[in-house]
Image (tube, helix red, strand yellow):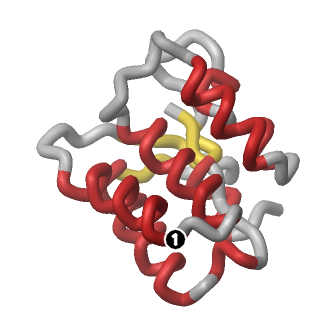
Amino acid sequence: MFGLAEGIAILAMVQAPVADDFGHQALVDGRDAAAIAAIMDNDQIENDDPARLINLGIAYARKGDEALARQLFEVARDKAERVELETAEGEWIDSRRLARQALAMLERGEFATGSRVAAR
């Protein structure tokens, strides 16, 4: 069973063709730099896609860049567009709610010990 952090970032791709486009497998494997590279190198993902923002935020939080992670989570939280994202545990959650959860986890320091991952 995944922890809260894994459940946040592993968004199962609903509209996109391949879940790994959002770096979810690299995040699950703890390969944060690889996840960042996979997400940043994928020009088919919009820069403001909630799954992209949340997964990048998780990867950066785990790498210790809490300021950038916070910015990414806040952008996802504040987007007018709502998207249902599937966590690694199979739970469907509103992207803004997921971003709020990620911000709360960041404040509690939970990304230092493990993370949820999200897919779309």
Horizontal arrangement in the rendering, residue 59 relative to residue 69 (left or right): right
Residue 26 or 118: which is nearer the viewer? Answer: 26
Q: Is residue 48 shown above or below 101?
A: above
**Residue sitting at x 83%, y 53%:** 30
Instruction: Give the side of residue 1 with respect to residue 100, left or right.
Output: right
The N terminus - image quarter? bottom right
Q: Nearer the viewer, residue 11 or 56?
A: 56
Q: Secondary structure at mark 1?
A: helix
- Residue 62 drawn at (x, y percent): 68, 65
Residue 110 location in percent, x, y?
64, 80
Quick one: which residue is furthest to the right in this view?
A: 29
Q: How many marks?
A: 1
Residue sitting at x 42%, y 72%: 103
Residue sitting at 41 percent across and 59 percent down?
98
Give the residue type that dot 1 points to.
Glu
Position of residue 24 measured from the top left corner of the image (x, y, whole percent)? 69, 38
Task: Tell me the residue at 70%/38% (across/down).
Answer: 35
2, 29: nearer the viewer: 29
Residue that sits furthest to the left in the current view:
80
- In percent of width and height, residue 68 lies at 45, 60
Mark 1 nearby-residue class (10 Å; few <14, some 14–19, many ≥20): many
Q: Which residue is mark 1?
A: 66
